[in-house]
Image (tube, rainbow, N blue to C red):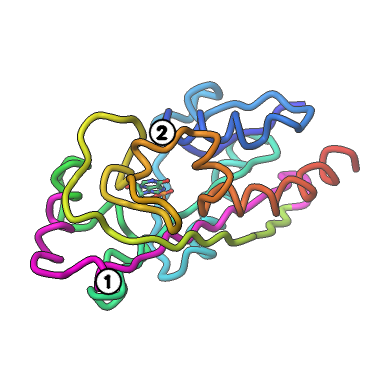
Amino acid sequence: MDLLIGTGNAGKLHEYEELLAGLPVRLLGLKDVGLGDMEVAEDATTLEENASLKVQAYSQASGLITLADDTGLFVDALGGEPGVYPARYGGPGLSSQQRRQKLLAALDGRVEAERSARFICVIALANPRTGRTETVRGVCEGRIALAESDGGSGFGYDAVFIPQGYDITWAHVPLAAKNAISHRGQAARLIIPMVRSLIEG
Ligand code: IMP
């Protein structure tokens, strides 16, 4: 059985390969089903609505059971910014590193205790046969580092996010440990039984 992950982001697809390893499915990314160029307008104001918009578009276009997620990054000292559109933070055309630098600049002068933040991930699951969509949500608390960490791995804001209980950024936390506590990991564990009942039903 194939399960489409509605992402073109190789880092995210790799995380899902680990997270869903126990499911009897073959994971496909958008490029694998010829949808690598498909744009879905994510113009809603909640993570649930945006994840649902994406998953419905991709499952209808592919005819496959599909997962799609939408993640927000909420920094308390910035009134909840970057919010539901972290990939757009700082304006159009910036690289991920430039967005990280914008975030650090916005928190300039704030001490560690004032840098609390959380990632929230909503995963939506769509059944193309019924058109039915379900969503789950995972949250990971942490803080924004004082500076970007060098080297390491990951994507997006990994090099500036320190999860609760750690003093290193996610860029330096091994993927298995990240998945055990991350917003996406928590949401994935909630969606696994729902995927299982869809493919078995
Ligand atoms: P998306 O909605 O999952 O595409 O996430 C939006 C943006 O949030 C991404 O472009 C990343 O910049 C950021 N993001 C999402 N998940 C993570 C993560 O696990 N680590 C770092 N950044 C993330």
Task: Confirm or reject: label 2 Cβ below 8 Å from ligand 1.
Answer: yes
Query: Which residue is more in the foreground, 28 or 171?
Result: 171
The region drawn magenta spans 101-130
Residue 103 drawn in magenta? yes
Residue 97 horizontal/vertical position (percent): 18, 41
- CA neighbours of label 1 inside 10 A, class few (<14), some (14 to 19), many (20+): few
- Name the residue rendered at 54%, 58% in the picture: 122
In the image, taking residue 172 as reference, residue 122 lies left or right, namely right
Residue type for callout 2? Asn
The residue wearing badge 2 is 9
Circle 1: element type: helix
Residue 52 location, quadrant: bottom right
Q: Is residue 32 above or below residue 12?
A: above
Residue 104 horizontal/vertical position (percent): 15, 57
Whole-number angstrom distance, CA of label 2 to CA of label 1: 32 Å
Residue 150 horizontal/vertical position (percent): 20, 34
Query: Which residue is more in the foreground, 58 or 143?
Result: 143
Residue 60 location, quadrant: top right
- Name the residue rendered at 28%, 64% in the picture: 82
**Are dots 2 and 1 in contact, CB under 8 Å?**
no
Query: Which residue is more in the foreground, 60 or 187?
Result: 187
- CA neighbours of label 2 inside 10 A, class few (<14), some (14 to 19), many (20+): some
Circle 2: element type: loop
Residue type for callout 1? Ala
- Name the residue rendered at 24%, 29% in the picture: 151
Query: Which residue is more in the foreground, 51 or 170?
Result: 170
- Name the residue rendered at 71%, 27% in the picture: 2
Residue 52, labelled with which disc?
none
Residue 113, labelled with which disc?
1
Residue 74 drawn in magenta? no
